[in-house]
């Protein structure tokens, strides 16, 4: 953890990044940009060209940063962690949501180690902090984009955005509902240290899943929204599903109990928690 003055905002360079890496394969190959449209978009193109698993694209700024459901992901230049990782899991396509599980657990553990904060997860993809007297506020999110052919995952691009050194004023302009690690800790933090800790955990968790050990119970225990009423917009114009977010399963799906008591497994969809 570092407490930088404003003038010494830490730069992410390829060599500084390499020095902070404690991984064997994840992020070892990396492309560092000052600005791109979206790190996910850059990496998807590289994935099509055959880049190896573990390749990472990171940028100080995104002009067209993407959130889920066509939303924008906004962060002031140099303030945050904005990066994407290429993975080529040998898993069945129906288990691909497990990447969200791994990303969530890795992010909670890494932020805990580097900042002392005890963050939690809001299914399916939000990293949240408890703001005293208010509610859970989002400080990060994951965007998973996949290319699946039949029973094979050709590639998965896991994009991560974490609001690190974003001030309360900046948040007010960009995203008043959100928070940042700086707001939560009152300190300016090292993005490199946080990234190094995150990648080390993500690699370990990924290798464990390949060996058959899924961090399901850990992930489940971090979710803040089980037991709460939920509304899920379903694809294809079907009526929305309204019920209770009862549990999650090992594939990472949300199990919603409807008013007839029937359980529905929801993989993604536009989900609104009603309380
Ligand atoms: C969400 O919570 O809606 C997902 C946010 C994901 C944002 C990250 S920032 C890096 C990567 N590149 C993008 O364009 N989006 C993801």
Image (cartoon, rainbow, N blue to C red):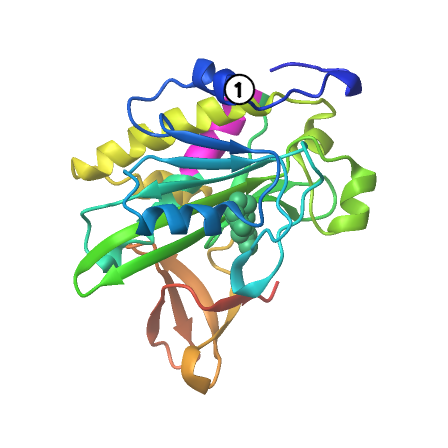
Q: What residue is pinned by disc 1?
A: 193
Please name the residue shown 35% across and 42% down the image. 86
Residue 187 in the image: state x and y as whole percent.
Answer: 72, 22
Does the magenta portion include 34? Answer: no
Q: Which residue is outermost to the right?
A: 169
Please name the residue shown 58% across and 49% down the image. 37
- Residue 143 appears in the rendering: yes
Residue segment shown in magenta: 105-114
Residue 56 in the image: state x and y as whole percent.
Answer: 41, 35
Identify the image quadrant of the N terminus: top right
Residue 266 in the image: state x and y as whole percent.
Answer: 37, 67
Q: Nearer the viewer, residue 244 or 210?
A: 210
In the image, taking residue 2 as reference, residue 30 lies left or right, namely left
Per the image, label 1 sits on a secondary structure element best described as helix
Vertical position of residue 15 compared to residue 153: above or below: above
Q: Nearer the viewer, residue 154 or 245?
A: 154
Please name the residue shown 60% across and 61% down the image. 71
């Amino acid at each position: 953890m570092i407490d930088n003055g404003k003038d010494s905002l830490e730069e992410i360079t390829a060599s500084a990044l390499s020095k902070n890496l404690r991984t064997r394969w994840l992020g070892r190959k990396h492309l560092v940009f000052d600005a791109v449209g979206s790190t996910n978009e850059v990496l998807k193109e590289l994935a099509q060209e055959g880049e190896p698993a573990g390749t990472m694209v990171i940028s100080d700024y995104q002009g067209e940063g993407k959130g889920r459901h066509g939303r924008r992901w906004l962060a002031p230049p140099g303030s945050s962690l904005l990066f994407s990782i290429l993975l080529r899991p040998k898993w069945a396509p129906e288990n691909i949501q497990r990447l969200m599980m791994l990303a969530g657990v890795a992010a909670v553990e890494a932020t805990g180690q580097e900042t002392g904060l005890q963050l939690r997860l809001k299914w399916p993809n939000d990293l949240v902090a408890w703001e005293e007297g208010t509610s859970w506020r989002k400080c990060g999110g994951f965007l998973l984009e996949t290319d699946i052919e039949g029973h094979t995952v050709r590639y998965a691009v896991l994009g991560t955005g974490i609001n690190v050194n974003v001030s309360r004023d900046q948040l007010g302009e960009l995203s008043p509902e959100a928070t940042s690690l700086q707001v939560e800790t009152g300190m300016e933090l090292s993005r490199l240290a946080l990234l190094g800790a995150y990648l080390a955990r993500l690699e370990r968790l990924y290798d464990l899943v390949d060996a058959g050990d899924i961090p399901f119970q850990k992930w489940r225990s971090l979710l803040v929204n089980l037991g709460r009423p939920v509304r899920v917009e379903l694809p294809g114009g079907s009526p929305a599903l309204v019920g209770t977010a009862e549990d999650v399963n090992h594939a990472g799906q949300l199990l919603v109990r409807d008013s007839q008591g029937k359980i529905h497994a929801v993989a993604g969809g536009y989900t609104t928690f009603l309380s």
